[in-house]
Image (cartoon, helix red, strand yellow):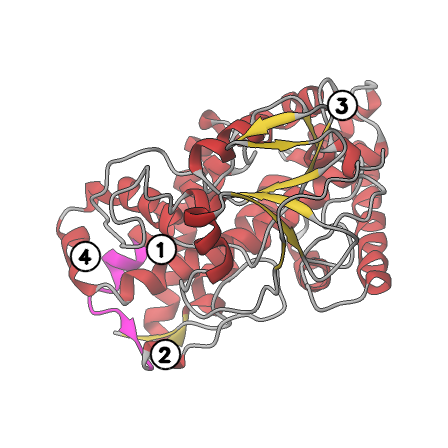
């Protein structure tokens, strides 16, 4: 489907550049206030797309069944990366009824019941890693001694990735989630990791375990899911579990360390941690640029603008989380904030399948660190901490701390 000609608003060239800490990208920050439904052009792909930034507008687009993810397959929509991050066929690029069928297959793995059972195991592993870090003494890089290893262990056990393969999968993660690679390099990495998960699913079919890959392999045997759907879904969930959780928790800890007054109050009232995690999720801009687009299957009115049938549109959740019409002083961190629910995990049918997992990991990691390291502080001046460049998800390269 080719988008119709529409000679209207200016197209903003969005040169997404690496930003330190929680600095907010200036273009979407301005558009949120001045042009909440705007046209943008990113560094890859063709043409332009709509960018929706206001809270209520973002929710409306994200939940509108006339906005298709499946129609993005094979179309070179302007984007952050030279290759599509999510392989075709998976839950992230499907529409109902395929999307509904795939979500039902993976929902039990990430449900509240499974997370309650996993929480205690994660807590014990966190205590062990914290003890090892304490024994080694300061300074320590918590991204390598604590946050990275714990998030990798959890996702490996939940999905069924052998621990011996984690280094290899992590290298693929870096290649796929890079915005500084070429299209050919990105597709080559995706082919390798797809082959790996296809082989792993065949192994799990003969040697099942208590993990998602085994469950998907059983569903494939029953005709509930195809091999391409299985592989694509496994790739997306694994990469998000390895990359997004690691980066967001490391950034959460950084934010707490540079807001000592608020963190001191949180230590004194640890029962407030779940609410504080929600505020951190709202406050932290987790991505460089945007995620996956949608394509309109009919004319859609939003924010006083008509998105025409066939046009591509992005929603930008970090901007929605800073909407001044929804949040009081939205650019200020307030760990006691009790306002509208954040949209860090998305909204609508494509709400993040692993939201409960990410929330549980963040609560366990931060609770353990705040309790076991009462004198925790950055080992260098905060402005000297290096932040990742050329990547989709934002986060510190390392987080050197002392205590």
- Image quadrant where residue 391 sits: bottom right
Dot 1 surroundings within 10 Å: few (below 14), some, or many (20 or more)? some
Residue tagged 3: 219
**Image spot of residue 402 (x, y percent):** 29, 76
From mark 4 to mark 2, how far is it between C-alphas? 19 Å
Whether 373 is among the magenta residues is: yes
Q: Residue at x 59, y 64 (%)?
A: 16
Q: Which residues are magenta?
A: 368-380
From mark 3 to mark 4, how far is it between C-alphas? 47 Å
**Image spot of residue 124 (x, y percent):** 39, 49
Residue 65 drawn above or below residue 291: above
Residue tagged 1: 127
**Residue 89 as seen in the image, left or right of residue 144:** right
Disc 2, SS = helix
Residue tagged 2: 383
The reply to whether dot 3 and dot 4 touch (C-beta < 8 Å) is no
Marked residue nearer the N-terminal end (1 or 3)? 1
Quarter of the image where the N terminus is located: top right
Q: Residue furthest front?
A: 7
Marked residue nearer the N-terminal end (1 or 2)? 1
**Residue 202 as seen in the image, left or right of residue 377:** right
- Numbered badge on residue 262: 4
């Amino acid at each position: 489907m080719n988008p119709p000609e529409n000679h209207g608003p200016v197209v903003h060239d969005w040169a997404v550049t690496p930003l330190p800490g929680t600095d907010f990208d200036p273009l979407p920050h301005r558009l949120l206030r001045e042009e909440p439904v705007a046209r943008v052009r990113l560094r890859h792909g063709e043409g332009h797309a709509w960018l929706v930034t206001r809270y209520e507008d973002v929710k409306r687009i994200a939940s509108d069944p006339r906005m298709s993810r499946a129609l993005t397959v094979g179309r070179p929509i302007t984007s952050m990366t030279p290759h599509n991050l999510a392989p075709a066929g998976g839950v992230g690029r499907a529409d109902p009824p395929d999307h509904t069928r795939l979500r039902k297959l993976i929902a039990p793995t990430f449900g509240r019941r499974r997370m309650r059972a996993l929480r205690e195991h994660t807590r014990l592993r966190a205590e062990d890693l914290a003890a090892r870090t304490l024994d080694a003494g300061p300074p320590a890089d918590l991204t390598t001694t604590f946050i990275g290893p714990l998030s990798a262990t959890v996702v490996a056990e939940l999905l069924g990735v052998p621990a011996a393969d984690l280094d290899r999968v992590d290298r693929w993660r870096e290649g796929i989630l890079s915005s500084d690679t070429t299209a050919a390099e990105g597709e080559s990495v995706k082919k390798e990791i797809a082959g790996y998960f296809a082989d792993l699913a065949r192994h799990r079919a003969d040697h099942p375990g208590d993990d998602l890959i085994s469950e998907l392999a059983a569903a494939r045997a029953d005709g509930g899911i195809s091999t391409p759907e299985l592989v694509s879904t496994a790739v997306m969930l694994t990469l998000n579990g390895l990359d997004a959780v690691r980066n967001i928790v490391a950034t959460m800890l950084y934010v707490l360390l540079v807001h000592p007054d608020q963190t001191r109050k949180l230590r004194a009232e640890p029962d407030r941690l779940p609410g504080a995690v929600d505020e951190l999720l709202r406050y932290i801009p987790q991505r460089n640029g945007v995620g996956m687009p949608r394509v309109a299957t009919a004319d859609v009115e939003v924010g006083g603008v008509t998105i025409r049938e066939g046009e591509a549109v992005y929603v930008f959740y970090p901007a929605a989380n800073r909407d001044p019409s929804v949040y009081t002083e939205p650019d200020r961190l307030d760990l006691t904030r009790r306002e509208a629910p954040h949209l860090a995990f998305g909204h609508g049918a494509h709400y993040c399948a692993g939201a409960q997992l990410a929330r549980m990991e963040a609560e366990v990691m931060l609770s353990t660190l705040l309790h076991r390291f009462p004198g925790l502080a950055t080992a260098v001046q905060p402005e000297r901490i290096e932040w990742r460049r050329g990547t989709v998800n934002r986060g510190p390269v390392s987080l050197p701390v002392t205590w």
